[in-house]
Amino acid sequence: QSSVTLSGVIDAGFEKRFSGDPFKMTPNRNGTSNWTLSGTEDLGGGLKANFSISTSFNSDDGTTAGNVLGNNGMFVGLTGGFGTVRMGRPVNTLYGNALLANGTKGVSFYDANAVLGGNATASAKVGGASSSVFVSNAIQYHSPRFGGVQVQVEYAPREVKGSGTADGFGLAVRYDEGPLALSFVNYKGADSNADGVKQKAVNQLAAAYDFGVARVLFTWRDQGGLPSNRDNSYALGVTAPVGPGSLYASYNVNEQPGTDGRTLIAGYKYNLSKRTQMYVNVANRNKAWLGGVPLPASNPGTMPNKSTTGFGFGLQHSF
Amino acid sequence: QSSVTLSGVIDAGFEKRFSGDPFKMTPNRNGTSNWTLSGTEDLGGGLKANFSISTSFNSDDGTTAGNVLGNNGMFVGLTGGFGTVRMGRPVNTLYGNALLANGTKGVSFYDANAVLGGNATASAKVGGASSSVFVSNAIQYHSPRFGGVQVQVEYAPREVKGSGTADGFGLAVRYDEGPLALSFVNYKGADSNADGVKQKAVNQLAAAYDFGVARVLFTWRDQGGLPSNRDNSYALGVTAPVGPGSLYASYNVNEQPGTDGRTLIAGYKYNLSKRTQMYVNVANRNKAWLGGVPLPASNPGTMPNKSTTGFGFGLQHSF
Amino acid sequence: QSSVTLSGVIDAGFEKRFSGDPFKMTPNRNGTSNWTLSGTEDLGGGLKANFSISTSFNSDDGTTAGNVLGNNGMFVGLTGGFGTVRMGRPVNTLYGNALLANGTKGVSFYDANAVLGGNATASAKVGGASSSVFVSNAIQYHSPRFGGVQVQVEYAPREVKGSGTADGFGLAVRYDEGPLALSFVNYKGADSNADGVKQKAVNQLAAAYDFGVARVLFTWRDQGGLPSNRDNSYALGVTAPVGPGSLYASYNVNEQPGTDGRTLIAGYKYNLSKRTQMYVNVANRNKAWLGGVPLPASNPGTMPNKSTTGFGFGLQHSF
């Protein structure tokens, strides 16, 4: 019997941003191109071992994000009546419990999660979370569901002693039953910002309701530990089944000085099958409060202070 | 049902070049060691989604060519009555329509494609083609076959605006029916050479005929945009079934100053099965016209002006 | 029919070393996390082609040891009445014939093989062996077994001419029948040490006996070519089935100046199934003879002259 499942996604498309970039091929606009090994073993007595090793790649030029294997989510763990324990580099507690319309993808640098977490700087990331989606060196406990309620605990101890380092702790409570989803997360970790705060706490509240014709999603995050009260970010989104596909739109705001801004995003995914989608999307980003938002040096083009728009289309296939 | 196929090649052997190198293990002498994920999904109505993600590796020391996944050819696309569309990093239009006897492999740096394209410099490469075999950031259209004729169009837009960059365009017409194969390719792209020419056009004509006892192959390439008329390269090859295997030989010439030279190559592949081959090959390289051809600094040994010979043997297994 | 098998290991756990490190997640404490492609093809007449391509990764943060594929063992080869020939990066002759209790893994830097080979320096490694477990650019011959006796020959020619380089040669004779295992290895290669010795010979003798209640293992290695007589290393180990798992312990000594030291290691592996284990282990390392043993700069914490202890636990799953 086979003990391993091989799966993945390949997504390629084209994009134009009116901020100085040419029209060009861009990978992973709707989903993250990846290949994944996963499996489950029945250990008897209701106990199961399970694992997943997912690695992302760039579908336009055949490169990866460094020397990686398992960067796109990885764990080995046990599941039983007590719940689930996972060790490795799982989805972090903040992102895993956010409720975003087409979260991490879309027109490059306009996606909801990047805005929520603070695009282009590490200031909004928490200790042990080497990206805004996954957390390395972490052990997670997911409780069983009691009447739709599930508790999640995360511990990501630091690797090195010294100033600027701290263990990461996450606690999430989630209700998910019928049309309603609610979640609260408290996350403590090292602040990689230069503001002298060593341990910061992030609180996140998220809610979604499925009205049938559309699902409305909201996530609000309080980036604690900043010397200003302007330390919140939030995302309001909607997804709706329309014809043989789904429409989505979101309004995402980050108040934090240095990474502040807001984006408007909308897109349509056309299902060629359950596994294959064509999509179009458009986004507008506005620098609302303070100085310019610099894009990463590795990214061609710059993000001017004024409103700028991008759009694109592509094809995503899951295998 | 399985939706993904896992396949690949592993090829390892030994080689001796009489240009200062020791006798040593060399990877990928007959085929490129790689592992490949691929699949096809029937979308109904004659439409299919398909993908391939192929990654090469060095079978002698367990390394890869950088942070790569899909570097050895990658695409996601659709196939239907209209033909085939592919996006990603497919085989480029020039190499895909060249007709070479054992094209890219053999005694290191003596292979036909390297000579055709201009060994050891990027001058013969075209915009968007990051190697002489594959092209990144490309979308390709392959028409259906009409009476043996197929048309291929490639567009590889540049990633960055600025001097020295240009979009890549390829157009190929190919006839392939019975014993005869004919192809013509016109390719325009950015010239990475320092000759001040921004946009260069390459024309390639190829023909092959299968006489039964042997197949004769010819590819001729005019490297346009050079300030000299000595800008052609060509390859003449023959392959013949002999016993439980096949014999091949080729004569390959590059006239371009700086990369000029000619190689004579011959080899025999012995089939242990359809999937497993043992092989031997020998090659002679001569610096025919101008100054010395330096090999890449990363490559031990140098290529003297005079004639130099190499040979080797190995084992290739496809899985 | 499938021609390729996909398998592997994922192992993650936690560790505390009392040498200045925090309690932290550490990958691969009991086994090396890896994913492996392998297969066998029947060529008829008793001949088979076989291959294996194994790549390691870090299960705690989704990284690899550089640009690697096949770094954790790789070969393509043929097996028949004559024996087995393998080309690529197989397990080296020294490690493959050592008899160690839980050889290369355990509390970081305390494992038996690292001590045996000379932790933290390359002085004990042999020409062509880029690690103390695998050897690149190698061809190996394994004879058939005659009355429990098998002969293994390894040739790993150097890649570059010049001082400090030499071909690697290995010869092993092994007896393995019933409760008794015996092996002798002679290995010659380039010495990467700065002691001016170009070609060094390493002799290794190993023996193990299975008493039923426990298996006792011993490996002794004479690191030839050193200007001192203090050039030996040895490992004494025991493994015993206890309850639904196995207990192991070892005492490992390296006399070589600069890498000298000894470790005491003990651990227990609890089998949740044939494929899944939980484990705990503890180790003490003592600097016995000369000056301090510096740990690699990349490794947090330092190894003081005095005795220091570490322990840990984890979960290993094979797929």
Image (cartoon, coloured by chain):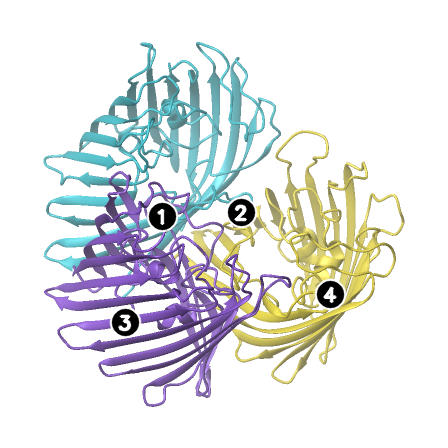
Chain colours: A cyan, B yellow, C purple
Tell me the number on the disc at residue C173. none
Which residue in the protein does label 2 denote?
A: A62
Tell me the number on the disc at residue C292. 1
Quadrant (top left, top right, bottom left, bottom right) of the N terminus of chain A: bottom left
| Disc 2 residue type (three-letter) | Gly
Chain letter for mark 3, please: C
| Disc 1 residue type (three-letter) | Gly
The answer to which of B45 and B215 lies nearer the viewer is: B215
For the residues labelled 2 and 1, the Cα–Cα distance comes to 45 Å
Which residue in the protein does label 3 denote?
A: C218
Q: Position of residue C229 (x, y in %)?
A: 40, 67
What residue do we see at 25% from left, 81% from top?
C180
Q: Which label lies toward us, 3 or 1?
A: 1
For the residues labelled 4 and 2, the Cα–Cα distance comes to 33 Å
Is residue B253 something that shows in the picture? no
Query: Which secondary structure lies at badge 3?
Result: strand
Q: Are marks 2 and 3 in contact (CB under 8 Å)?
A: no
Q: Which label lies toward us, 4 or 1?
A: 1
For the residues labelled 2 and 3, the Cα–Cα distance comes to 47 Å
Which residue in the protein does label 4 denote?
A: B19
